[in-house]
Image (tube, rainbow, N blue to C red):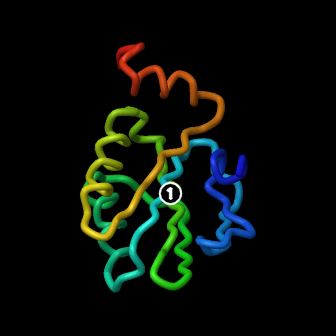
Amino acid sequence: VSAAMETGTIRNSVNFPSTSLPVRPEHAVRFTVVNENLPGMLASITDVCARSNLNIIQQINQSRGTIAYNVIDVDTTAKEDVMSFKSVQEEINAMEGVLSSRIIYNTQTTEEHQDILEGKKST
């Protein structure tokens, strides 16, 4: 369970496909997206990243039955604004067929990013 929370890796799950990406590059944010396994979903998700001018460094899409799980690493060197990543996540969550998503920040800055998202610290 901790690997799923910290890296997005899933192993030995009854409901989800096994999924693992290599170690996340230093200047990257990882999005995880659970969606219905429908044609065009991956294209729609990556289109949100493209419209937000986010460069996808690496990604994986695995499915099991009616559920698909995506792990997407985006480059943060040109865009380190936490709220812009949150707005991308909100747009992905609003898509029909998306069941849930998460953003996994670099572990060194997770607490700082969480404080910003919770309004405890300004950007």
Considering only vertical position in the picture, is 27 above or below 109?
below
Residue drawn at x 37%, y 53% is 54
Residue 65 image point, x, y percent: 51, 85
Say left or right for 98 vs 95: right
Quick check: 30 left or right of 89? right
Question: In x, y percent, where is residue 110?
Answer: 57, 30
Q: Position of residue 57 (x, y in %)?
A: 52, 60
Q: Quadrant of the C terminus?
A: top left
Asked if residue 1 lies left or right of residue 99, the reply is: right
Residue at left offset 35%, top offset 40%: 86
Q: Residues within 10 Å of mark 1 (few under 14, many from 20)?
A: many
Determine the residue positioned at 54% across, 44% down: 104
Mark 1: which secondary structure? strand
Q: Amino acid at mark 1?
A: Thr
Compared to 13, does 55 lie above or below? above
63 or 54: nearer the viewer: 63
- The residue most toward the front is 14
Q: From the top left corner, tell me how far across and down residue 7 is, in percent.
A: 65, 51
At horizontal 66% and vertical 72% (from top left) the residue drawn is 14
Residue nearest the viewer, comparing 39 with 75: 39
**Depth order, front residue of 30/6:** 6
- On the image, numbered disc 1 is attached to which residue? 32
The tally of labels here is 1
